[in-house]
Amino acid sequence: MRFRYKVIMINIAFLSIALGILGFIIIHRNFKQTLEIQTSYAIEENNLIQAAIEYRLLDVVNEKNSNITAHLKDAGKETSLNLLSERSSLFILYNEKLVYSDEENSQEINAVSETLFSSLELGDKSYMLKKENNGYYLYVSTKNIINDRDLYIITKRDAKDSYQLLYNQIQYFFLLMIVVLGICSVFMYFISLHLTKPMERLNAVTDYFANGNYQTRADVISDDEIGMLAEKFNNMAVSVSEHIEELNLMVKQHEQFVADFTHEIKTPMTTIIGYADTLRSKNMNEDRKKLAYQYIYSEGKRLETMSRKLFDLIYLKDSELVKTEISTSLLASEITDSMQPILSRKNILLKTDVAPAVIFGDRELVKTVFINLIDNARKASVENTSIFFRGFTENDLYIFQIEDSGCGMDEETVKHICDEFYMADKSRSREEGGAGLGMSLAALIIKKHNARLVIKSRLGSGTVISVMFDGFAASTTAMDGLSD
């Protein structure tokens, strides 16, 4: 069942209950007031009849041998003819006997006499309402004593007008309630249609979204709960879209990783197999054998480097680092000593200017980062040039910089330089023993240290790479000797 129909049915149910209770209270109050008026009329009529009968008996009540019963009959007849209304009847009981009745069937008076007389005192009046022959009647009784005998004057008044009015009001109320509920139902239908229309539009948007249209958004046209729901749906849709894009990108990266890894493995394996087969199947002189051995060795070393860096990448992605204090001066000295032999092959000078301080991290991993960055600068540089390795503080940061004057990189290369297996110049990188994993590993290590990597480069104008550490301590001379 649709929500709007539930709203309509619930509103109609509550409206019906409210109208029913209100109608019951009003009708019951009107009926009670009408019945009270009828009762007061019946009592006044009984008083009038009593006064007339007692007045007729004043002359004979003290006479000896007077026939009170006969006089009561005459008084009852005369009073009924002159004073009694058409809707009323008169009963006179004297000495526990019915003396006068203007009804042919007076048996009903016997059924009500005990109730009327049970607690009636001299001069008092009692009344009761009784249903007879599909009608309602008010009995009013008064008590007097004549010649030491009880005299009861009873009037019976038809009260059907009050009940007829009650029935008419109930019928009219039900008719009116049906009309009101019908009109309210129509109005509530259109109102609920208007109120639920934004929900239907939101429902349609969710259908589009569920079918894969992740760019679909809901229109926020109000600031009520539905508008807030639409806004939260849009926020959720943006978040889901971003996650889906991330997942798609991750899938593409994984696919590209597998493709690149397969390609990178294939090249050295082909070389190794080819030269091994040549050595196995052909007679070669010593120079060509040495060249084949050299190719097999260099490609084997590249496979070893690739596997080691792949292992480091996988390990770092799933592990937490244990950070210790690292002296920047001592770190720079160790890096310079490690890189000096390979830099000297191209007669490249490493100029170091690192301000003393203490940073926090994994010493070997941080050392790996800068050896990798300086080695990349070496590969991009020509012979007889310099590479600058600086360290300084700036705005609560400790910044390492590696600057070279080599071939530089274009914007596309800078954008993808940290991707796995990405090499700007594949032929030169393979000649240098590269596998396209060094910058990926360096970027991951830097990220694990909550540091930032900034690369500025122009094609043909060299490259400046900055690594910014957020947490460091100002160093003194004593700290320069810090070691793990």
Image (spheres, rainbow, N blue to C red):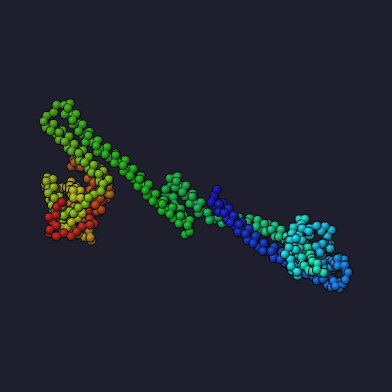
Is 296 or 77 nearer to us in this picture?
Answer: 77
Residue found at x 15% / y 50%: 335
**198 on left or right of 353:** right
Is 235 or 297 nearer to us in this picture?
Answer: 235
Number of marks present in the image shown = 0
Which quadrant would residue 171 be assigned to in this image? bottom right
The answer to whether any part of residue 77 appears in the image is no
Q: Position of residue 51 (x, y in %)?
A: 80, 71
**182 on left or right of 426:** right
The answer to whether any part of residue 57 appears in the image is yes
Q: Position of residue 283 (x, y in %)?
A: 14, 26
Q: Position of residue 52 (x, y in %)?
A: 82, 71
Instruction: Check the image and report above or below for 290 versus 386.
Output: above
Is 264 or 233 nearer to us in this picture?
Answer: 233
Which quadrant would residue 328 be assigned to in this image? bottom left
Residue found at x 16% / y 29%: 279
**307 on left or right of 169:** left
Q: Position of residue 219 (x, y in %)?
A: 46, 54
Residue found at x 22% / y 33%: 270
Residue situated furthest right in the rendering: 65
Residue found at x 41% / y 51%: 237
Instruction: Check the image and report above or below for 154 versus 437.
Output: below
